[in-house]
């Protein structure tokens, strides 16, 4: 295996998707980066899913799934919800806005630019993963937004680690601290990272040890975290974005409502990424969320650019009108072609 450089696999390009399904009682979803088209007539897609994931068992049983193609607008909280928790334990789509496709499965209403409904045609056991080869029963484009890639996620979405010791999962930000170990999975305190079993995986996202790097290296290579935003008086984890609100506390872990951040127990850590209290930043003042910038659209026939900031006043379209809200019968002021001939700049 000396001839295998595990980091070479990180050079392979991937998209990022939320796979949705239903186990017969409730909807479920998971993050997946292994979706690809494998034939054109008929159109088939292959989806590879870790057999340790609950979603694998649901899809194998039901024979259908939806692939929600994520847009670059997706925030880290979305990956936390669908990637760092198990559908065995929580209802991941509770409180999430979605519609349903013809097969009855969820289609995300936000941060998704397309979806494809799949019906399983064949299954191959690949040891750690199961490979589902599927026919496409429905497919729709939902927006012109750019798709999320694995590279974009690492560069723009995943927060920077706030610790210097231990080893950081480059996928989800979980930190393995040899002094603590991973007792829940049979790794006692004091176990060096190099001595972890070959089949040990990240407790949060299930990626292997090869996807970890020293915390000091991860901190040095990562972009600085953005300022904490939200309601004044709360504290935000700089690694995963979890918000501790003293007014709410965290009763599930014995922290009653009204507990000031400064009075949290010394061993308290972030419920999501397990970082210590030192990884939290206070929010000093109310900061409104950033508003997305309306995109320009270019006519593919004549090159005319529709700028939402300007609109098309000559034809009754006021400044500030997004392209998506233009009337169905609006056409290019130059060549008179319809909206369907425009593409996002």
Image (cartoon, rainbow, N blue to C red):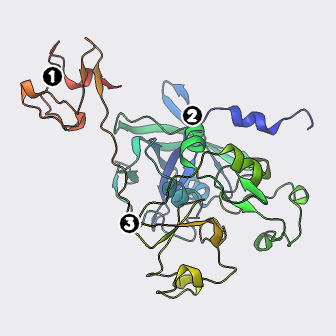
Residue 147 lies, in percent from the top left, at 47, 36
- CA gap, disc 2 and disc 1: 35 Å
Q: How many labels does the image show?
A: 3
Q: Quadrant of the N terminus?
A: top right
Q: Residue at x 19, y 22 (%)?
A: 338
**234, above or below 314, in the image:** below
Task: Tell me where residue 195 appears, x and y as whole percent.
Answer: 91, 59
Q: Quadrant of residue 46?
A: top right
Q: How far apart, in angstroms, are the residues tagged by discs 3 and 1?
A: 38 Å
Identify which residue, 65 or 214, lies in the foreground: 214
Determine the secondary structure under disc 1: loop
In the displayed structure image, the side of residue 156 where residue 285 appears, left or right = left
| Residue 313 higher or lower than 186, as above or below | above
Residue that carries the numbered disc 2 in the rendered image: 36
Pick the front one: 295 or 208: 295
Please report whichever mark, 3 or 1, sits nearer to the chain's N-terminal start.
Answer: 3
In space, the residues marked 3 and 2 are separated at their CA atoms by 30 Å
Q: Cβ–Cβ below 8 Å for labels 3 and 2?
A: no
Q: Mark 3 points at which residue?
A: 95
Label 2 residue SS: strand
Mark number displayed over residue 133: none
Would residue 338 appear left or right of 22 to someone viewing this image? Answer: left
- Taking the image as drawn, is residue 284 in sight? yes
């Amino acid at each position: 295996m000396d001839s295998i450089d595990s980091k070479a696999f990180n050079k392979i390009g991937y998209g990022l998707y939320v796979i949705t399904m239903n186990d017969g009682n409730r909807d479920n979803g998971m993050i997946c980066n292994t979706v690809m088209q494998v034939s054109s007539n008929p159109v088939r897609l292959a989806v590879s899913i870790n057999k340790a994931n609950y979603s694998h068992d649901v899809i194998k049983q039901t024979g259908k799934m939806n692939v929600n193609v994520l847009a670059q607008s997706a925030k880290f909280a979305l990956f936390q919800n669908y990637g760092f928790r198990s559908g065995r334990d929580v209802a991941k789509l509770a409180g999430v806005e979605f519609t349903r496709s013809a097969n009855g499965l969820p289609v995300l209403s936000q941060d998704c630019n397309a979806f494809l409904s799949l019906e399983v045609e064949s299954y191959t056991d690949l040891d750690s993963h199961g490979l589902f080869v599927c026919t496409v029963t429905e497919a729709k484009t939902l927006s012109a937004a750019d798709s999320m890639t694995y590279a974009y996620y690492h560069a723009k979405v995943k927060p920077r680690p706030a610790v210097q010791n231990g080893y950081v999962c480059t996928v989800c930000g979980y930190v393995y601290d040899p002094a603590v170990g991973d007792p829940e999975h049979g790794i006692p305190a004091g176990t060096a990272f190099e001595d972890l079993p070959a089949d040990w995986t990240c407790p949060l996202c299930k990626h292997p040890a090869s996807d970890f790097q020293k915390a000091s290296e991860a901190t040095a290579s990562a972009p600085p975290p953005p300022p904490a935003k939200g309601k004044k008086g709360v504290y935000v984890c700089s690694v995963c974005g979890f918000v501790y609100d003293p007014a709410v506390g965290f009763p599930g872990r014995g922290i009653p409502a009204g507990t000031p951040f400064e009075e949290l127990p010394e061993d308290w850590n972030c419920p999501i990424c397990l970082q210590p209290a030192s990884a939290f930043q206070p929010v000093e003042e109310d900061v409104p969320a950033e508003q997305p910038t309306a995109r320009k659209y270019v006519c593919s026939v004549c090159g005319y650019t529709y700028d939402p900031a300007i609109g098309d006043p000559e034809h009754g379209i006021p400044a500030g009108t997004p392209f998506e809200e233009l009337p169905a019968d609006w056409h290019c002021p130059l060549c008179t072609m319809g909206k369907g001939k425009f593409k996002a700049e």
